Image (spheres, rainbow, N blue to C red):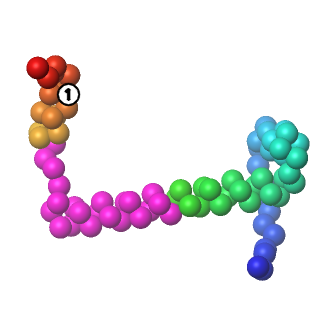
Amino acid sequence: MKTRAITAHIPNELAEQLDKISARIDRPKGWVVKQALTTWVELEEKRHQLTMESLADVEANRIVEHESIKIWAANLDKTVD
């Protein structure tokens, strides 16, 4: 696998937290950063996918009216007999 080095300026407090985590789990800082970035990128991709799906639903008029949601939410507190 090819790799690239990147440079990022981060606040000192964050760098210190990274140092502590790296030491605690006995892994290089680069490994910790790679894990964190991988997780963030996956989450951001999922957010983007869900946003695109939501926009497609709006375009196709697959929506629920606000008033219907308010009524549904108000009924959540009611006890079922």
**Hey, which quadrant is residue 35 in on the image?**
bottom right
Classify 24 as above or below 42.
above
- Expressed as whole percent of the image width and height from the top left, the position of residue 6 reads 78, 66
**Hey, which quadrant is residue 79 in on the image?**
top left
Classify 76 as above or below 11.
above
- Expressed as whole percent of the image width and height from the top left, the position of residue 76 reads 20, 28
Could you tell whether 34 is left or right of 41 in the image?
right
Q: Which residues are magenta?
A: 45-66
Instruction: Say which residue appears at 76% left-offset and 49% top-offset.
Output: 10
Instruction: Say which residue appears at 20% left-offset and 22% top-offset.
Output: 77
Q: Nearer the viewer, residue 17 or 24?
A: 24
Q: Which residue is under mark 1? A: 76
Classify 6 as above or below 81.
below
Please name the predominant secondary structure of the magenta segment in the image: helix
Residue 78 appears in view? yes
Q: Nearer the viewer, residue 10 or 36?
A: 36
Kind of residue sitting beneath label 1: Leu
Where is the N terminus found, in terms of image quarters?
Answer: bottom right
Confirm whether the magenta stretch covers residue 10.
no
Q: Nearer the viewer, residue 52 or 81?
A: 81
